[in-house]
Image (spheres, rainbow, N blue to C red):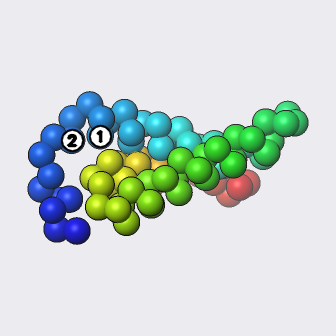
Amino acid sequence: MSGMACAPGGGSSFASDGLMASVAALGLLTGGRLASPWRVIVPVLSGVVILAGVVLVVAGDAHGVAVLIGAALGLLAAPVRMRRRA
């Protein structure tokens, strides 16, 4: 695990993975307000993205860290009003 903290790279793939996961985290919060069938599809796919981040971290891949950090930032960036409704 300590190798992930100083893994080389972390440029564009880290940024794009983090952005994707932040949008996925917002999908967890807002998906229930969408019209059917998106009401189910968006949260499920969002959960798959975040679960993939966890699997990557367990596998020792640094991209998983980007996914989880992006998801956390996406949840923090959501307006407080949105987080209370979820």
Drawn side of residue 10 relative to residue 61, left or right: left
> Which residue is at 75% across, 41% downward?
41
Q: Position of residue 22 (x, y in %)?
A: 48, 43
The amino acid type found where label 2 is placed reads Gly
Drawn side of residue 37 relative to residue 42, left or right: right
> Which residue is at 45% across, 60% downward?
54
Q: Which residue is mark 2?
A: 10
**Residue 51 appears in the figure:** yes
Q: Is residue 3 above or below residue 82?
A: below
Q: Position of residue 58 (x, y in %)?
A: 37, 66
Judged from this view, the residue extending furthest toward the front is: 59
Along the line of sight, the residue nearer the viewer: 13 or 24: 13
Instruction: Give the secondary structure at mark 2.
Output: loop
> Which residue is at 79% across, 45% downward?
40
Q: Quadrant of residue 26?
A: top right
Q: Is residue 29 above or below residue 54?
A: above
Q: Which mark is residue 14?
A: 1
Give the CA separation, mark 1 to mark 2: 5 Å
> Which residue is at 39% across, 56% downward?
56
Judged from this view, the residue extending furthest toward the right is: 36
The number of callouts visible is 2
Contact flag, marks 1 and 2 (Cβ < 8 Å):
yes
